[in-house]
Image (cartoon, grey):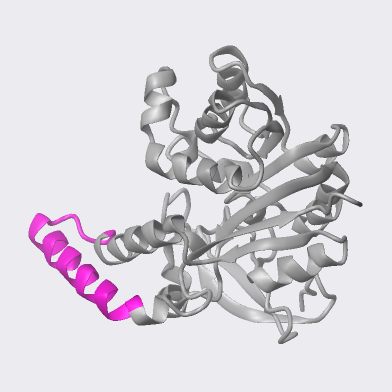
Amino acid sequence: MPICAQCGQSAKLFLQAKDYNLKVSDVVFDYYRCTNPECGVIFLSPIPDNLGDYYSSDYEIYAKPQNIDELTNVFGYQEDIKLNQIMKFVAGGKMMEIGPGYGGFAYRAKKAGFEVEAIEMNDDACRFMNDVIGIKASVSADPISTLRKTGQFDVIALWHVIEHIPDPWTMLDIIPEHLAPGGIVVIAAPNPQSFQFKIFQSHWRPLEAPRHLNLIPAHVIQKHLDKKGIKPIILDSQDELAKLADYTYWHDGFTRYFSNPALKRMARIASGLTHVFAKPFERQPFGRSTYTLIFQRPTDS
């Protein structure tokens, strides 16, 4: 029986899922849930040896832009929301983004005055950031080791990245060492406590088997960073990004299995009605499908 790497307690098989999103293979993947009620981390075990094969060009973040204009037009509204969230607390300085894809957010941060660096496992994305948008990007499938070799930053951003890291706990351990006094770390991730996850389970869009290795309740991240003296300033699953995600995931959850236009329209109507019904549940604390957490290193540390 697998052991939870976060708390050391045993874990039980929670669900089984295929790669329903990209359909790279028909392999069934096992997700376990920690039996510790104060933990509840859900994790994939075993991690496939060929995990890299599941990050094809069809994966949304690796759709290559042809130029900067195309880069800024893709998910532009969402990237602006992210930047605004950060600039409420830090208006400039050095920023490290881990897992930026082709750098849509990183480019906006650079234009806003940040000195941006990035760590990204896709070598073509790193070439694009280095050569086209002028951001220092390091190619690495081991962001923990790469981050260890860097200095301190005023912002460290992981936008839907922590769930992809095989050992998120070591990453959370070393991030405080690389935050400047007063610096912030931003972590956005799928929310395993969400109402939608309870409905869709193995077919939940953000489960993203097998690319998402860990689904971590927000309070677990909070407790882990608290031990390092990093204090929360935002713990939110009601932000605009979470609302957009819920709308998208309801639509996708109902329509993804239909190719017939008439059936797809019916599924779209059903998704809209269900979304209306679900709103009171999603408005509960951590009821939405994603969360955004911002923590700050005290200035006197």
Which residue occupies the foreground of this view, 85 or 133? Answer: 85
In the rendered image, residue 162, in percent from the top left (x then y), is placed at 66, 53
**Residue drawn 41% across and 75% down?**
282
Residue 63 visible? The answer is: yes
**Residue drawn 46% across and 34% down?**
57
Q: Place residue 31 in its image quadrant.
A: bottom right
Image: 279 above or below 49? below
Q: Is residue 66 left or right of residue 191?
A: left
The question of residue 265 being in magenta is answered with yes
* Residue at far right of view: 301
In the rendered image, residue 225, in percent from the top left (x then y), is placed at 80, 62
Numbered circles on residues, count: 0
In the rendered image, residue 184, in percent from the top left (x then y), is placed at 72, 48
- Which part of the image, by quadrant, shows the N terminus? bottom right
Which residue occupies the foreground of this view, 37 or 51? Answer: 37
**Residue drawn 57% across and 23% down?**
124
* Residue at far top of view: 131
Q: Is residue 98 left or right of residue 15?
A: right
In the rendered image, residue 119, in percent from the top left (x then y), is placed at 70, 33
Image: 12 above or below 113? below
Image: 234 above or below 104? below
Which residue occupies the foreground of this view, 134 or 63? Answer: 134
Residue span colored magenta: 256-279
* Residue at far left of view: 262
**Residue drawn 28% across and 59% down?**
256
The majority secondary structure of the magenta stretch comes to helix
Q: Is residue 158 left or right of residue 65?
A: right
